[in-house]
Amino acid sequence: MKKLSVLLLMSVILILSACSNSRLEPKSLYGNTISEFSGTDDKGKEISNKDLKGKVWLVDFIFTNCETVCPPMTYNMSTVVDQLEKDGISSKDYGILSFSVDPKRDTPAKMHEYINQHNPPKNVWRSVTNYDEKFIRQFAEENFKTIVVPPTETNDQATHGTSFYLVDQNGMIIKDYAGKDTGDKKFPKAEIVEDVKTMINEGPYKK
């Protein structure tokens, strides 16, 4: 009887440990809710931080004239979308959001063409543009702790981070991932897919 009690107690501890470890917690850099923003999406519709409520989001920063990091980042994001679609995850539960770091040149039509080169499922991938360069630089730094340096008259290539960011259903930034292979650091597709599914199943982070 004593052995049975001990086994039952160990089972309960293991179950509780699994439950407590399964919830995604914000990395030390994050844990903040995305501040207010407004712009135009790739379909020419207004979009703001209020539109993020109720879904899990993967966020990145790109521009359509990019000659280096954006093409592999965008392809990698498309492979995440493909896997989530294969796994039966509905567009009602998650979305992709790409902020332009070159809003002067990235019209909604250009963003639409750029994103849809990989034929994502309908209503999954949205973009944001139509704000000024000062805004996107400050927005990226304050919310995502990443650098954005828009193009200049002498250099048409913006400088920006290559991370993807996981955002919960309340608009809270949870963690980041390498958006492309960098040295020994490989693009963590499987981790991203599993984290999105976990956040969908468990709901937004609760302090």
Image: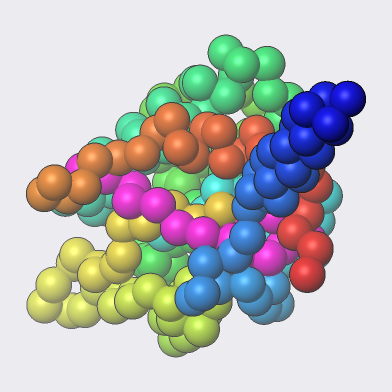
Residue 184 is at least partly visible in this image: yes
Instruction: Report the side of 9 relative to 87 (left or right).
Output: right
Picture coordinates of residue 140, whole percent (x, y): 46, 75
Looking at the rendering, the stretch of residues picked out in magenta corresponds to: 167-181
Left or right: residue 191 compared with residue 201: left
In which quadrant is the N terminus drawn? top right
Instruction: Tell me, yes or no, if residue 37 can be seen here.
Output: no
Q: Nearer the viewer, residue 87 or 45?
A: 87
At 80% across and 63% down in the image, what residue appears? 206
The image quarter containing residue 115 is top left
Residue 207 in the magenta stretch? The answer is no
**At 33% from the left edge and 51% from the top edge, which residue is drawn?**
178
Quarter where residue 95 is shown: top right
Q: Is residue 103 left or right of residue 153?
A: right
Q: What is the x, y in percent for residue 64?
A: 33, 50
Query: In front here: 116 or 93?
Result: 93
Point out the image quarter for the C terminus: bottom right
Position of 172 relative to 142 (above/below): above
Q: Eyeballing the image, is 108 above or below 117?
A: below
Residue 172 lies in magenta, yes or no? yes
Occupied quadrant, residue 50 = bottom right
Rendering coords of residue 54 (x, y %): 82, 49
Taking the spot 40% from the left edge, 33% from the top edge, the residue there is 189
In this rendered view, identify the residue nearer to me: 141 or 12: 12
Q: How many marks on residues?
A: 0
Image position of 117 (left or right of 167): left
